[in-house]
Amino acid sequence: MVSVRGRPWWAVPAVVAVLAATLVMAGHAGASARRGIDEIFDPSGLVGVVPGQAVRLNVSNVSEGSCRAKLQLIDPQGAVVASKAATIDADASASLRLQPSGRIQVRARVISIMQSCSKNEVSIETIELKSGKTVTILEGEPIG
């Protein structure tokens, strides 16, 4: 009987076939993972907020499908000062509100989870707490 390192000759092609199939499957899994990477959008500039005011980040989903997103408010140094995960249905909105104890500057960041947000409108506004009136509103770049 012919053998390769003590194994029957027919075992070698079987091992090679299993290894080849494993590499092909790993390549497909890697391609899927690359397509599903979260997308980060920074659609606005900085807005200043003082005590007695709140800042609100609004994300409106104007697509036909739902959107899974993480809404964040970022300070000038890039630190996340507020964050909220949301599933936003078609034609619906989600908001993140922050009431600072001191003066703060923030900008909006929206993370599209697994690139699920295809068409969204973003705004960031400052609100006077006593009256509930919007003082400033900035419309960010559309995302998705």
Image (spheres, rainbow, N blue to C red):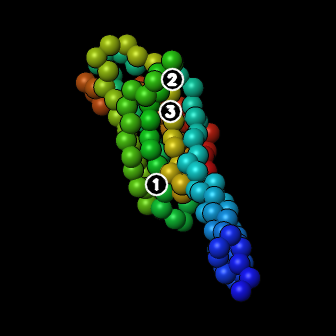
Distance CA(mark 3)–CA(mark 1): 16 Å
> Quick check: marks 3 and 1 in contact, CB under 8 Å?
no
- Residue 5: x %, y % from top left: 68, 70
**Image quadrant where residue 7 sits:** bottom right
Q: Secondary structure at mark 1?
A: strand
Q: Residues within 10 Å of mark 1 (few under 14, many from 20)?
A: some
Relative height, residue 105 to residue 34 (above, below)? above
Residue at x-position 58% and y-position 51%: 37
**Nearer to the camera, 47 or 37:** 37
Q: Is residue 130 left or right of residue 139?
A: left
Q: Residue furthest bottom?
A: 1
Q: Which residue is mark 1?
A: 68
Q: Which residue is mark 2?
A: 78
Q: Residues within 10 Å of mark 2 (few under 14, many from 20)?
A: few
Of the residues under marks 3 and 1, which one precedes in the sequence?
1
Residue at x-position 58% and y-position 46%: 39
- Residue 107: x %, y % from top left: 50, 27
Residue at x-position 49% and y-position 57%: 67
Q: Secondary structure at mark 3?
A: strand
- Residue 48: x %, y % from top left: 45, 18
- Residue 133: x %, y % from top left: 35, 30
- Quick check: can you spot residue 12? yes
Relative height, residue 119 to residue 15 (above, below)? above
Residue 143 is tagged as none
Q: Secondary structure at mark 2?
A: loop
Of the residues under marks 3 and 2, which one precedes in the sequence?
2
